[in-house]
Amino acid sequence: MVALIPINSSSIRAVGYEGSTLAVLFHTSVTVYEHHGVPYSLFEGLLNAGSPGIFYNLFIRGKFK
């Protein structure tokens, strides 16, 4: 299981990255969603985004298994 770190976002509670797997926990769910094959640069972008939720929707959601 990927270790999660809390982030400052109104939609995303915590994220984690291991290997090429991005894990995302939303405020509205207890399920951790894993996305495989995500480049580390996108994880960094998510962490540094002004709005992690918008970044997730634009660059990650639906683009990785």
Image (cartoon, helix red, strand yellow):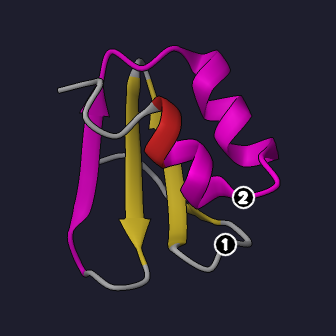
Residue 29, position in %: x, y? 27, 81
Q: Which mark is residue 9?
A: 1
Question: Image height check: is 8 above or below 62?
Answer: below
Question: Image height check: is 37 above or below 18?
Answer: above
Question: Image height check: is 6 above or below 24?
Answer: below
Left or right: 52 with respect to 53? right
Residue designated by label 2 = 51
The crowding category of the residue bearing disc 1, from other C-alpha atoms within 10 Å (few below 14, some 14 to 19, many at least 20), is some
Q: Residue at x 26, y 43 (%)?
A: 34
Q: CA distance from mark 2 to mark 1?
A: 7 Å
Magenta stretch: residue 37 in it? yes
Q: Nearer the viewer, residue 40 or 64?
A: 64
Q: Residue at x 50, y 37 (%)?
A: 58
Determine whether label 2 and label 1 are within 8 Å by CB: yes
Residue 20, position in %: x, y? 40, 18
Q: Amino acid at mark 2?
A: Ser
Tag 2 secondary structure: loop
Q: Residue at x 65, y 42 (%)?
A: 46
Left or right: 35 with respect to 25? left
Residue 62, position in %: x, y? 25, 34
Q: Nearer the viewer, residue 20 or 64?
A: 64
Q: Which range is magenta?
A: 30-56
Q: Quadrant of residue 9?
A: bottom right
If the image is split into quadrants, where does the C terminus sit? top left
Q: Earlier in the sequence, mark 2 or mark 1?
A: 1
Magenta stretch: residue 6 in it? no
Left or right: 13 with respect to 51? left
Looking at the image, how many numbered discs can be counted on the residues?
2
